[in-house]
Amino acid sequence: MTKPLLMATGMRPIRVVALTPAGVRLARRLCQTLEGTECWLPASWATAGEHTFDRLTDVFAEAFTNDRDLVCIMAAGIVVRQVAPLLQGKDRDPAVVVLDQEGRFAVSLLSGHLGGANELACRVAATLGGTPVITTATDIQGLPALDLLAAQAGLIIENPTGVKEVSMALLAGKPVRLVDPEDRLATVLAGYPHLFHREAALEAALAGSPQPTVYVGCRERSWPTGWLRLRPRSLIAGVGCHRGTPSLEILDHIQEVFRQAGLSLLSLKALATIAAKKDEPGLKEAARRLEVELLWYTAEELEHVPVPHPSAQVTRHVGAKSVSEAAALKAGQGELLIPKHKSANVTVAVARAIWPS
């Protein structure tokens, strides 16, 4: 399951690491004025209350493992050699900024957009009266950073290669199509009204001429090349199951329902069920593996939800006329996309959460 994108910097602790006496003085100055920072200094230079290290390699490794941003007051070459074996991907690496020991230049070195290094470099430079050095092409040309805009809009990037393809088209001045039926990018793209031409319907866009396209939605199709697919967390799977149903059986049925309906599991926001099932081990494990919440409602709450397929048998067993459909609708407050679909032990229905919530 793909994880949501990293948050922008400013929400994570920032390690300020220095090696020389002048660098140590600058690190202390920065940590006194920039919120969320902590000094990491060689043991021979540190004073009480400051973090110390004997091996620089350990500082970097721990920062990457524990999701800490880095401001490195040292030569860029040292930093490059330290981070090279630790890199995992632009959607997972922390922000790394390199600062000269005079504080004149703050260089965004790694994870400029998603990790927030561009933003961090600007904050560091503003704090010290220096100059931020930003090298990402879209920023230089005043174009939107699609990966950052997706994160700001709460969207999951399904195919990171699509970011590169669409960004290259924007940089070359080529037309880019936008298929965003719910206008989820409207706010973050408000400053770029002329860069995209809208296509309201997905099927019309798929049938149209090949061109770079940004699609925002939960539908699965056979995708052409050059499409960037952004997934909103917009779907609720209502789930009912027999007692003791294994998590794998629940997961298999959810996946099958989504596959048959042409829906992306990356758009799954939560599982929903009746209160009597909230401690069912298989359901709890399924939610954990899907990395979503497990929501539950009382029989009385579900009984008052209008559903297309009420069941007298379900009423006799749990006190409500529906579990899967009613729970999905109750949680999403939107439309029912997929009516209940039964296997031997599991029933699943899918609703779309109302937008904006």
Image: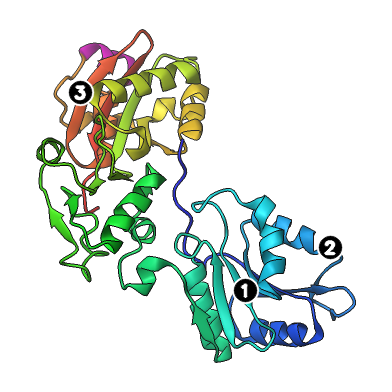
Residue that mark 1 sits on: 98
Nearer the observer: mark 3 or 1; the answer is 1
- Vertical side of 275 occupied by 120: above or below: below
Secondary structure at badge 2 equals loop
* Type of amino acid at the residue the image marks with label 2: Arg
- Vertical side of 245 occupied by 67: above or below: below
Query: Which of the marked residues, 2 or 1, is nearer the chain's N terminus?
Result: 2
- Vertical side of 311 occupied by 107: above or below: below
- Vertical side of 327 occupied by 44: above or below: below
Task: Identify the residue at image location x=24%, y=46%.
Answer: 215
Query: Which of the marked residues, 2 or 3, is nearer the chain's N terminus?
Result: 2
- Residue 203 coordinates in the image, percent (x, y): 12, 36
Task: Identify the residue at image location x=24%, y=57%.
Answer: 185
The one nearer the camera, 154 or 211, is 211
Instruction: Characterize the magenta stretch by its predominant secondary structure.
Output: helix
Secondary structure at badge 3 equals strand
* Type of amino acid at the residue the image marks with label 3: Pro
Residue that mark 3 sits on: 339
Asked if residue 207 is among those painted magenta in the image, a careful observer would answer no
Nearer the observer: mark 2 or 3; the answer is 2
Residue that mark 2 sits on: 55
Magenta stretch bounds: 312-319
Task: Identify the residue at image location x=16%, y=27%.
Answer: 307
Q: Residues within 10 Å of mark 3 (few under 14, many from 20)?
A: some
Nearer the observer: mark 2 or 1; the answer is 1
